[in-house]
Amino acid sequence: MNVREAALAEARHWIGTPYRHQASVRGAGADCLGLVRGVWRALNGPEPQALPPYPARWDAGGEDLLMQAAERWLIPVNEAEPGDVLLFRLKPCLPARHCGILSSSNTLVHAYWGRAVSETAMTPWWRRIAGQFQFPSQVK
């Protein structure tokens, strides 16, 4: 199994996990970043850095910390494939505040406020892609 297949399979194991801000425990609670963190741990072991607290509000300004972390620990790709991480901006002028794992050309596994981790259609709302990344290939 390659890294993308492994990442997508793991992400799908998280489906149904309730939304919990800043959580990352499959079956107990996760937010969008918690899902990506959980997939990282399944593929690569311990997370490479501790996370600072981050706001629950999508419209919060500030530094683009999510993008900076993705650029540091993930591999940028020009064309995302299933199993890759996508980052999203609510508006072009704001930092990336949402992430998920592409599951097909038209679907995404992610968690967002009020929803459990789910696989949903990539409607126009979710086409505000700020970055596309692949997990490192250190699959256990």
Image: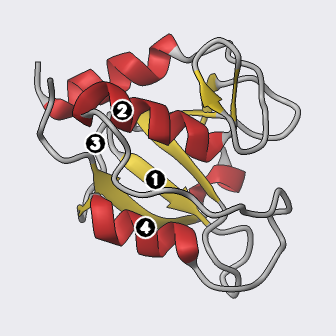
Q: CA distance from mark 3 to mark 2?
A: 20 Å
Work out whether residue 84 or residue 37 is closer to the camera in this orientation and state it.
37
Q: Position of residue 26 (x, y in %)?
A: 58, 18
Dot 1: what SS?
strand
Quadrant of residue 6 within the rendered picture: top left
| CB atoms of marks 2 and 1 within 8 Å | no
Q: Of marks 2 and 1, which one's residue comes earlier in the chain?
A: 2
Q: Amino acid at mark 2?
A: Arg
| Pointer 3 residue | 81
Q: CA distance from mark 4 to mark 2?
A: 15 Å
Q: CA distance from mark 1 to mark 4?
A: 13 Å
| Pointer 4 residue | 69
44 to the left or right of 101: left
Q: Position of residue 140 (x, y in %)?
A: 14, 23
Q: Could you tell me which residue is drawn at 73 percent across and 68 percent down? A: 90
Q: CA distance from mark 2 to mark 1?
A: 18 Å
| Pointer 2 residue | 41
Q: Could you tell me which residue is drawn at 66 percent across and 25 percent down? A: 117
Q: Amino acid at mark 3?
A: Glu
- Of labels 2 and 1, the one closer to you: 2
